[in-house]
Image (cartoon, helix red, strand yellow):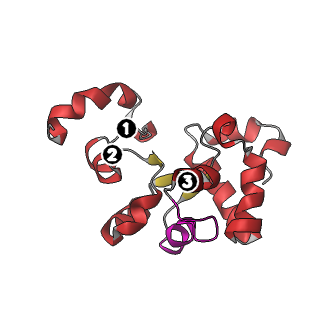
Amino acid sequence: MPTWPATRPVFRPSCSRPPSRRRATPDCTSVWAAVRHLGAERIGHGVRSVEDPALLEHLAKRGITLDVALTSNTQTGASPSLRDHQIHALLAAGVPVTINTDDPRVSNVTLSQEHRTAVDEVGLTPEQLLAVAEQSVRAAFTDLGTVESWPSSTRQP
């Protein structure tokens, strides 16, 4: 298997955005590789980052957001259960997270359902859910003016 530098050109198309707007995709072989070699500011499916304390510290210090899909993470085995989901450790470590649906048709879940699951089954507090929703806005690849132009119903968790 080739080393990372040999495979790096494969990922260049996903990094066509300016460095301040890069988001790692599931094609990245690891969270470390995505942040070190691609300059990713947002990582999809990075819940296993909790297994590496140095990585957690790096993500928190640099404000790199992890997109978390509670239902999908549990369905795929990336998380042992909803109650034991890694989002608790991520939040405790200060890692910015967002809650997402991953693939709503495969997981049969909407974003509203994921938010309800976060409180009812995962055990997040309403305050934690609000903080995660606010992080979703901060991590959006758009400017604040665009976010403020959205209907108010889309800005309430």
Q: Furthest residue to the bottom? A: 92
The residue indicated by pointer 3 is: 73
Please tell me whether residue 113 belongs to the stretch shown in magenta: no
Mark closer to the chain start, 1 or 2 = 1
Residue 18 appears at what percent x and percent y? Answer: 39, 32
Q: Which residue is mark 1?
A: 19
Left or right of residue 62, residue 12 in this image: left
Q: Rounded to the nearest whole Å, what is the CA distance between mark 1 and mark 3?
A: 28 Å
Q: Residue at x 78, y 54 (%)?
A: 157
Q: Which residues are magenta?
A: 79-93
Residue name at image x 77 percent, y 37 percent:
150
Name the disc covering residue 38, or none.
Answer: none
Element type where label 2 sits in the image = helix
**Which residue carries the number 2 mark?**
34
Most common SS among magenta residues? loop
Picture mark count: 3
Q: Residues within 10 Å of mark 2 (few under 14, many from 20)?
A: many
Determine the residue positioned at 34% across, 67% down: 52
